[in-house]
Image (cartoon, rainbow, N blue to C red):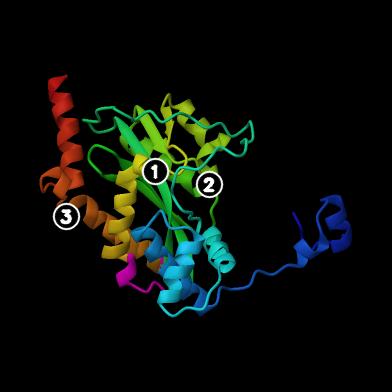
């Protein structure tokens, strides 16, 4: 790691680390308010039409009066960690260290808590920036078991949330994610294997394979995030935490016959213990 206070010159430190000097001196620039507004609008359009690619999003933004090109839209989508969701041809081989696991939920009757957990990452806009939200969801009850915010798309904050869920709620039979690099990494899959959990991954571009997490993102954004203007990560953490507590414990869920995720999750576990 580069140490600017070390007596060894920066040039020599870069040589020893095989690092370009321009990389060592680079200072990240902040995202402009105009770009943040565009990214928020792209997020809204993507949530409404997940199949829309850079070209379609460009055309939709132009209808809003934005003068923008496809390449700029594509750059913003990459920064936000989103892409158009549709079946794509298999045009490249993944690194052998990043194995892709089959989708295990097709035709599987998911009827009890802790049978299947699902997880994903989404983009959260703020007044002066953005963060990423990762959440672990119990499939049967829709209960959010753990979550984390991060300003970078790394694996560590995902692993922290999964570890919290495992400690608090035990091990699920199956853990389902998409094929994002955070979830195919050896660190993430290794954690699940250590606990004897079967790993399931969505098909490429098949957002319906993880549909309940996608529905959670829609609820979080339309009922909380888009109504706020978080001015800091701590404010975003408080707002998201407040909403997820409301989502778990108070908000009735139509798919659960008006019950809350907390009620369904706890009732399910109680019924299993009574039967045992």
Residue occupying the point 34% across, 60% down:
48
Q: In front here: 270 or 77?
A: 77
Q: Look at mark 1 in the image and give the residue it sits on.
A: 119
Relative vertical location of residue 74 with respect to residue 172 in this rendering, above or below: below
Neighbour tally class for label 2: few under 14, some 14-19, many 20 plus, Cα within 10 Å:
few
Q: Can residue 58 be seen by looking at this rendering?
A: yes
Q: Taking 152 as reference, is 135 left or right?
A: left
Mark 3: which secondary structure?
loop
Q: Quadrant of the C terminus?
A: top left
Q: Position of residue 22 (x, y in %)?
A: 79, 65
Residue occupying the point 48% across, 27% down:
193
Query: Which contiguous range is marked in magenta?
Result: 225-234
Sooner in the amino-acid sequence: mark 1 or mark 2: 1
Residue 222 on the magenta span: no
Query: How far apart are labels 1 and 3 at the CA level?
Result: 22 Å
Q: Position of residue 243 (x, y in %)?
A: 27, 60
Residue occupying the point 38% across, 36% down:
166
Q: Look at mark 3 in the image and give the residue it sits on.
A: 250
Q: Position of residue 221 (x, y in %)?
A: 32, 62
Sooner in the amino-acid sequence: mark 3 or mark 2: 2
Q: Position of residue 114 (x, y in %)?
A: 29, 32
Q: Quadrant of the N terminus?
A: bottom right
Query: How far apart are labels 3 and 2 at the CA level?
Result: 30 Å
Q: Look at mark 2 in the image and give the residue it sits on.
A: 156
Of the residues tagged 1 and 2, which is closer to the observer?
1
Q: Can residue 7 be seen by looking at this rendering?
A: no
Query: How far apart are labels 1 and 2 at the CA level?
Result: 14 Å
């Amino acid at each position: 790691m580069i140490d600017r206070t070390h007596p060894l010159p920066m040039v020599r430190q870069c040589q020893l680390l095989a690092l370009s000097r321009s990389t060592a001196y680079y200072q990240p620039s902040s995202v402009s308010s105009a770009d943040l507004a565009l990214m928020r609008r792209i997020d809204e359009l993507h949530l409404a039409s997940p199949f829309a690619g850079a070209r379609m999003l460009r055309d939709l933004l132009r209808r809003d009066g934005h003068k923008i090109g496809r390449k700029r839209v594509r750059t913003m989508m990459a920064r936000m960690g989103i892409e158009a969701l549709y079946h794509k041809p298999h045009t490249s081989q993944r690194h052998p260290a990043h194995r892709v696991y089959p989708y295990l939920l097709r035709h599987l009757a998911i009827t009890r808590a802790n049978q299947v957990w699902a997880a994903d990452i989404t983009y959260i806009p703020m007044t002066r920036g953005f963060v990423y939200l990762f959440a672990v969801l119990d499939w049967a009850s829709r209960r959010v078991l753990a979550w984390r915010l991060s300003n970078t798309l790394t694996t560590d904050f995902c692993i922290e949330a999964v570890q919290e869920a495992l400690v608090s709620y035990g091990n699920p039979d199956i853990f389902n994610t998409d094929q994002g690099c955070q979830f195919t990494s050896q660190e993430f899959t290794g954690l699940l294997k250590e606990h004897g959990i079967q790993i399931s991954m969505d098909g490429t571009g098949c957002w319906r394979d993880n549909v309940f997490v996608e529905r959670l993102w829609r609820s979080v954004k339309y009922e909380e995030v888009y109504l706020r203007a978080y001015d800091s990560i701590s404010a975003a953490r408080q707002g998201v935490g407040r909403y997820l507590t409301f989502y778990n414990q108070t908000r009735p869920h139509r798919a659960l016959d008006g019950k809350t995720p907390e009620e369904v999750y706890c009732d399910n576990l109680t019924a299993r213990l009574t039967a045992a």
